[in-house]
């Protein structure tokens, strides 16, 4: 059974290596979002599949008011590390319609696995470090030779810590990036 799986994988890799249509390059990119900065390296694994390795700083800001506590602002800067498997689709169709496919421009499905550490700067922020999994749908678009836009929408699953319990939440991310190479 394992030999058959290895042969099928080798045949799949060989077929993808022969077809150069719409192949995306690996790329290093610096990104800015509304509440964060990060750098990522997107490594092409197969014709339409990539591994996106990312490290960055996510920021948060919150305001709360209660009769007991009064008003207060909370903020935090948290390092975040993740690996994301992406499967692009519709690339050949985009190219046939004359749309850009450089800098990995296209739509994708992904699964990200990550870890957010304790904050490096914080005021009135109480959260422990945690891991997470985010299945998502996303898109990348190119602007000029070096700029890109990325949007990703998904659902986060996180066991969190013993005192907060598991968290399931809708997540959205919009960012502008500069493709370094």
Image (cartoon, helix red, strand yellow):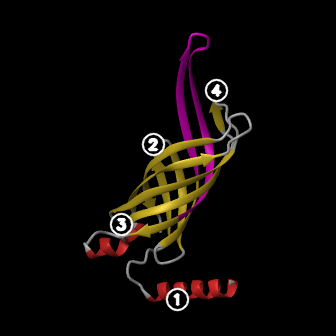
Mark 2–mark 1 distance (CA, rounded to whole Å): 41 Å
Residue position marked by numbered label 3 in the rendering: 145
Residue wearing tag 4: 124
Q: CA distance from mark 3 to mark 1?
A: 30 Å
Q: Earlier in the sequence, mark 3 or mark 1?
A: 1
**Residue under numbered circle 1:** 14
- Residues drawn in magenta: 56-85
Mark 4–mark 3 distance (CA, rounded to whole Å): 42 Å
Is residue 74 rendered magenta in the image?
yes
Label 1 environment density (alpha carbons within 10 Å; few <14, some 14–19, many ≥20):
few
Q: Position of residue 4 (x, y in %)?
A: 64, 87
**Relative to residue 62, is residue 107 depicted above or below?**
below
- Front position among marks 4 and 3: 4
Residue furthest to the top in view is: 67
Which numbered disc covers residue 34? 2
Residue drawn at point x = 61 percent, y = 14 percent: 69
């Amino acid at each position: 059974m394992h030999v058959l799986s290895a042969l099928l994988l080798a045949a799949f890799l060989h077929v993808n290596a022969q077809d150069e249509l719409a192949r995306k390059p690996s790329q290093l990119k610096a990104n800015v979002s509304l509440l964060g900065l990060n750098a990522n390296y997107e490594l092409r694994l197969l014709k339409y599949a990539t591994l996106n390795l990312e490290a960055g700083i996510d920021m948060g800001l919150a305001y709360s008011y209660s009769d007991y506590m009064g008003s207060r602002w909370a903020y935090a800067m948290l390092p975040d590390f993740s690996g994301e498997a992406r499967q692009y689709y519709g690339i050949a169709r985009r190219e046939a319609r004359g749309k850009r496919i450089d800098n990995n421009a296209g739509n994708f499905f992904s699964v990200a696995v990550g870890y957010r550490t304790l904050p490096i700067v914080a005021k009135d922020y109480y959260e422990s470090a945690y891991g997470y999994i985010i299945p998502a749908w996303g898109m990348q678009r190119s602007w000029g030779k070096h700029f890109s836009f990325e949007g990703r929408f998904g659902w986060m699953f996180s066991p969190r810590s013993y005192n907060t319990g598991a968290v399931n939440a809708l997540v959205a991310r919009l960012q502008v990036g500069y493709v370094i190479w």
